[in-house]
Amino acid sequence: MLQGIDLSKWNTVPDYNKLSSSGLAFAYIKASEAGYNDPEYRERHNAIGETGLLRGSYHFFKANVDPIVQAKAFLNAIGHTIVDGEMPPVLDIEDPKEQLTVMQYEDSVEKWLNYVEGQTSIKPMIYTGGWYWTQLQTLDNTSRFSHYPLWLSSYTPTYGKMFGGWTAPSLWQYTEKGNIADINPVDLDYYYGSPSDLWSFCKMKPISKSTSFAPKAKAVQDRLSEVGFYKSAIDGQFGANTENALMAFQKAKGLEQNGIMDVNTWVELFEIKTF
């Protein structure tokens, strides 16, 4: 398992750079709710992009608002595309005020999921908890969406009994009272898989002179500078100086000396913790 966080306007992040040495592997950021964008999303998304964490975006769903309006709000927030290296888009389903019939609610959810997948070519993930999904007045434990990955909300020692046709979550939000990298409180999550699995989940590719991951190249330079291997300008341009510094780091860690920020180098450089 790998650990991550999820952020909204309720979280204060004193120093994003601290995330690159926190052991965290990923962060989800609230992009939108109902028909409007989160005002802090773009700044947060950009800041996370310049850390060692992989990042993703989520939408807080209000079933009494036209789902296509909501999907368009989400897509507008994220820039209408999901590039390689981004976590799948997420539909957050947990609003206790909804008063639709189960069928109406299901249909509304499906419209959002289909629209976003159609526009991005990426299958979304659903965030919810059994405490919400199984209620008669909301979704009555429907299994209509069990073919989507699940991000489970369950603040218990183990994630407990599954529901909705799902057999296991892809992500588990296990607390809302985390404290990491001076962010307190913050939601903490586990991803069920290895670092290589997470990179595949996000379609993350190795970073080298032949790629254009400028924000992540800056993160690599920042981190190499922190650990004493990089002395040049931190400009997000992955050139010969960055390549040579990365090769020196790889040699020191007993890794393949290829000058490429591959998954194994990512784990070592950013001290990604596994559980």
Image: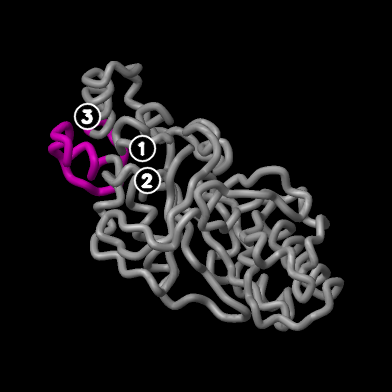
Residue at the image point whose x is 25% and y is 52% from the top: 18
User: Could you classify mark 2 by the number of other residues whose Cα lies within 10 Å: few (under 14), some (14-19), or many (20 or more)?
Assistant: many
Mark seen at residue 24? 2
- Measured along the vertical axis of the image, is residue 48 above or below residue 14? above
Q: Image check: 71 left or right of 56?
A: right
Kind of residue indicated by mark 2: Leu
Name the dominant secondary structure of the magenta segment.
loop
Residue 50 placement (x, y as % from top left): 33, 52
**Mark toward the start of the polypeptide (3 vs 2):** 2
State how far apart marks 3 and 2 are (Cα).
Answer: 23 Å
Q: Which of the image's four quarters has the C terminus?
A: top left
Residue at the image point whose x is 71% and y is 57% from the top: 117
Mark seen at residue 272? 1
The part of the image, by quadrant, that contains residue 116 is bottom right
Does 205 lie within the magenta span? no
- Measured along the vertical axis of the image, is residue 202 above or below residue 29? above
Kind of residue indicated by mark 3: Ala
In magenta, the rendered stretch is 221-241
User: Could you classify mark 3 by the number of other residues whose Cα lies within 10 Å: few (under 14), some (14-19), or many (20 or more)?
Assistant: many
Label 1's element?
A: loop
Residue tagged by mark 3? 245
* Pick the front one: 198 or 245: 198
Residue at the image point whose x is 67% and y is 70% from the top: 71
Residue 257 placement (x, y as % from top left): 31, 18
Which dot, 3 or 2, sits closer to the camera?
A: 2
Label 2's element?
A: loop
**Mark toward the start of the polypeptide (1 vs 2):** 2
State how far apart marks 3 and 1 are (Cα).
Answer: 20 Å
- Is label 1 in contact with label 2 (beta carbons under 8 Å)? yes
